[in-house]
Image (cartoon, rainbow, N blue to C red):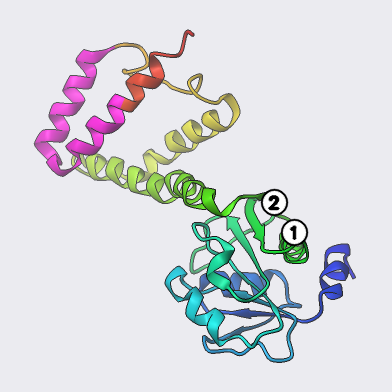
Amino acid sequence: MSEARTEAAEFGRWAVVGDGRVGRALVASLPWLSGPYGRGFSGKDFDVVILAVPDGEITRAAGAIEFGPIVGHCAGSLGVDVLAPHEAFAVHPLMTITREGGQFAGAGAAIAGSTPRALSVARCLAAALELRAVEIADEDRAAYHAAASIASNLLVTLEDAADVMFRTVGADRSLLIPLARAALENWATLGVPAALTGPIARGDEATVARQRAAIEERAPDLLALFDALADRTRAIASHRDE
């Protein structure tokens, strides 16, 4: 039995509520978790219950749990107060999970606990999933989750905008993928602003103007997005030599 499994066993029997992407991924990664059970599950005979349900359903799902188990959720933007009056914890894996599943190992995780014991449960679950845990206070979780959404959800939206423009010239988005991956890797290894390249970084506003005109002509609904990103890029570029 692994060290993480041994530690988890010390807290008793664990259950997962929520047969969605996160619930299924948790059980697939840690077969010793029971479930996933449907909403309305009472938690009877279990010592730890993880609610892997949509944010808006957490309070209702927590209300169905009989008092006794330590109850946790997997939401990024919510604190443990939504689980009152239960002894509560939160573990939010900082990783995208699709219908095909997700790989937890090596990813980050925001954890919290209403008591030292509950926080220990959160750390135990994070360790079992091989997540890099960081404690995030309740008042900081919305800001933390906004950063996570920008880094993942909004990045996909941005790449979709690039795809829209690429299709206007008859090119396939597969040609953009190496470029996008290289830019992300440069950001990861070099940081900002060293990873910044392109016309704004080199002060070529004439090229930026041509780009803007092309967007205005072919995908005008993307113009406000382009302008906002260009302004932010100019601000980053202005600090490159500081």
Question: Which region of the structure is painted magenta?
Answer: 204-231
Q: Is residue 27 magenta?
A: no
**Residue 142 visible, this angle:** yes
**Residue pushed farthest top?**
241
Residue 105 lies in quadrant: bottom right
Total marks shown come to 2
Residue 230 higher or lower than 113, as above or below: above
Pointer 1: what residue? Answer: 123
Q: Is residue 164 left or right of residue 58?
A: left
Give, as a three-letter code, the residue at label 2. Answer: Ala
Pick whichever of labels 2 and 1 is earlier in the sequence.
1
Give, as a three-letter code, the residue at label 1. Answer: Arg
Q: Residue at x 60, y 57 (%)?
A: 93
- In which quadrant is the N terminus drawn? bottom right
Q: Residue at x 33, y 20 (%)?
A: 234
Q: Main secondary structure of the magenta part?
A: helix
**Residue pushed farthest left?**
217
Q: Please say if the residues under marks 2 and 1 sit with CB atoms less than 8 Å apart.
A: yes
Pointer 2: what residue? Answer: 133
Whole-Å distance between the Cαs marked 2 and 1?
A: 7 Å
Of residues 209 and 50, the one drawn nearer to the viewer in this rendering: 50
**Residue 106 visible, this angle:** no
